[in-house]
Image: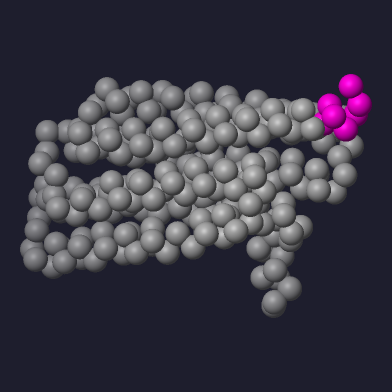
């Protein structure tokens, strides 16, 4: 097998691992929110325990990337692909951490009737999960248009977070206290975690831009300054 074909085979395996890690992260997001909405403590614990498998997957991908960089002497575009993958898995691991944080926080909702502003959380979960899925797909397919479309969806996530925040302010102004006020603050924390997950998906898409055009968003901003 030639050096080039061997590199291509390993790069394809790397992409498959990224897709697998992305699927694990999407499942953690979905199950973390379901644990909250259903007040399911057992599911919450499984999400938290599953974070270890995602950490292990990150380390496996990291080792693959380093082997490719050290042994295969990739050309410029190949180097960008491997380097971007290294950056992406950091964001994916942080998303998984935030899903585990949501699962931990869901224990605070046990035995409570959920207040109205919780209703925005499933929509945020759907957007977050779809952004993660499309960002990884954009990387594997090197699809700049798909990456930019995913970045634009962050506005949708920000709008949902704004609604949660506005409803919290209105609730507190109405004089809500005790359990309702405490739950509202917890919901805002969950919404903030979801917003951050959207930000991490945007980061992944910015690395797709770097892969395709060779310039990262931060470099463009520095040039503008």
* Residue drawn 10% across the image and 41% down it: 113
Residue 52 x/y as whole percent: 49, 25
* Residue drawn 42% across the image and 64% down it: 155
Residue 71 x/y as whole percent: 87, 30
Horizontal arrangement in the rendering, residue 145 relative to residue 134 (left or right):
right
* Residue drawn 69% across the image and 28% down it: 13
Residue 120 within the magenta-colored segment of the rendering: no
In the image, residue 18 sits, relative to residue 212, either above or below, namely above
* Residue drawn 85% across the image and 29% down it: 5
Horizontal arrangement in the rendering, residue 180 relative to residue 86 (left or right):
left
Residue 31 x/y as whole percent: 34, 33
Residue range in magenta is 1-7
- Location of residue 72 by image quarter: top right
Q: Nearer the viewer, residue 117 or 106?
A: 117
Residue 4 within the magenta-colored segment of the rendering: yes
Q: Is residue 87 visible?
A: no
- Location of residue 140 by image quarter: top right
Q: Is residue 152 visible?
A: yes
Q: Nearer the viewer, residue 181 or 140?
A: 140
For the C terminus, the image quarter is bottom right
The total number of labels drawn is: 0
In the image, residue 130 sits, relative to residue 101, either above or below, namely below
Horizontal arrangement in the rendering, residue 90 relative to residue 159 (left or right):
right
- Location of residue 75 by image quarter: top right
Furthest residue to the bottom?
225
Residue 178 x/y as whole percent: 10, 50
For the N terminus, the image quarter is top right
Q: How is the image coloured?
A: one colour
Horizontal arrangement in the rendering, residue 6 relative to residue 205 (left or right):
right
Main SS category, magenta section: helix
């Amino acid at each position: 097998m030639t050096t080039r074909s061997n590199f291509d085979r390993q790069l394809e395996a790397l992409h498959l691992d990224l897709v697998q890690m992305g699927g694990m992260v999407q499942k953690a997001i979905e199950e973390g929110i379901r644990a909250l909405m259903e007040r399911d403590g057992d599911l919450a614990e499984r999400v938290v325990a599953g974070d270890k498998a995602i950490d292990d997957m990150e380390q496996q991908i990291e080792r693959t990337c380093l082997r490719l960089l050290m042994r295969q002497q990739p050309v410029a575009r190949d180097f960008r692909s491997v380097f971007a993958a290294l950056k992406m898995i950091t964001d994916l691991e942080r998303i998984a951490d935030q899903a585990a944080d949501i699962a931990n926080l869901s224990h605070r909702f046990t035995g409570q009737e959920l207040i109205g502003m919780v209703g925005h959380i499933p929509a945020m979960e759907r957007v977050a999960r779809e952004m993660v899925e499309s960002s990884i797909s954009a990387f594997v397919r090197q699809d700049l248009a798909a990456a930019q479309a995913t970045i634009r969806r962050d506005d949708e996530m920000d709008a949902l977070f704004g609604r949660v925040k506005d409803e919290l302010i209105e609730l507190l102004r109405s004089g809500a206290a005790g359990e309702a006020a405490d739950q509202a603050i917890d919901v805002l924390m969950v919404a903030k975690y979801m917003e951050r997950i959207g930000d991490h998906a945007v980061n992944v898409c910015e690395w797709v831009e770097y892969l395709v055009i060779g310039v990262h968003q931060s470099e463009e901003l520095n040039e503008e300054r």
